[in-house]
Amino acid sequence: MREFVTSQRLCGMDRVIPVGGALDMNIVWDGYDIVASLSRGIDVH
């Protein structure tokens, strides 16, 4: 698949991963803290 993508010069492809691996990630993904990025803090006084 990787050879096909690079040989066809497909635009918009960021990465090629195995089938079923799209959601395999850690808390830090591509340098971003997923929990911090998808959360918001609420202060209650």
Image (tube, rainbow, N blue to C red):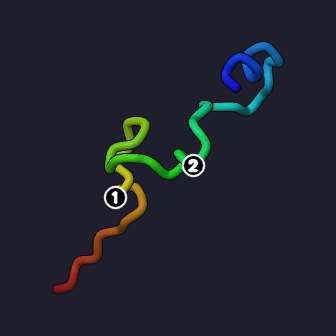
Label 2: how many residues lie within 10 Å, few (<14), some (14-19) or many (20+)?
A: few
Q: Amino acid at mark 1?
A: Val
Q: Quadrant of residue 12?
A: top right
| Nearer the observer, 34 or 42 | 34
- Residue 31: % across, % down: 37, 36
Mark 1 → mark 2, Cα distance in angstroms: 22 Å
| Nearer the observer, 6 or 43 | 6
Specify the farthest residue to the left.
45
Q: Residue at x 52, y 45 (%)?
A: 21
In the picture of the structure, the residue carrying the numbered disc 2 is 20
Image quadrant holding the C terminus, namely bottom left
| Nearer the observer, 2 or 29 | 2
- Residue 11: % across, % down: 78, 27
- Residue 2: % across, % down: 67, 22
**37 displayed left or right of 23:** left
Looking at the rendered image, the disc whose residue lies closer to the viewer, 1 or 2, is 2
- Residue 4: % across, % down: 76, 20
Compared with residue 17, is residue 27 higher up or lower down, i.e. above or below?
below
Specify the farthest residue to the bottom.
45
In the picture of the structure, the residue carrying the numbered disc 1 is 35
Compared with residue 19, is residue 39 higher up or lower down, i.e. above or below?
below
Q: Residue at x 33, y 44 (%)?
A: 28
Q: Secondary structure at mark 1?
A: helix
The circle drawn on residue 3 is none
Q: Secondary structure at mark 2?
A: loop
**23 displayed left or right of 3:** left
Q: Residue at x 79, y 25 (%)?
A: 10
Compared with residue 12, is residue 19 higher up or lower down, i.e. above or below?
below
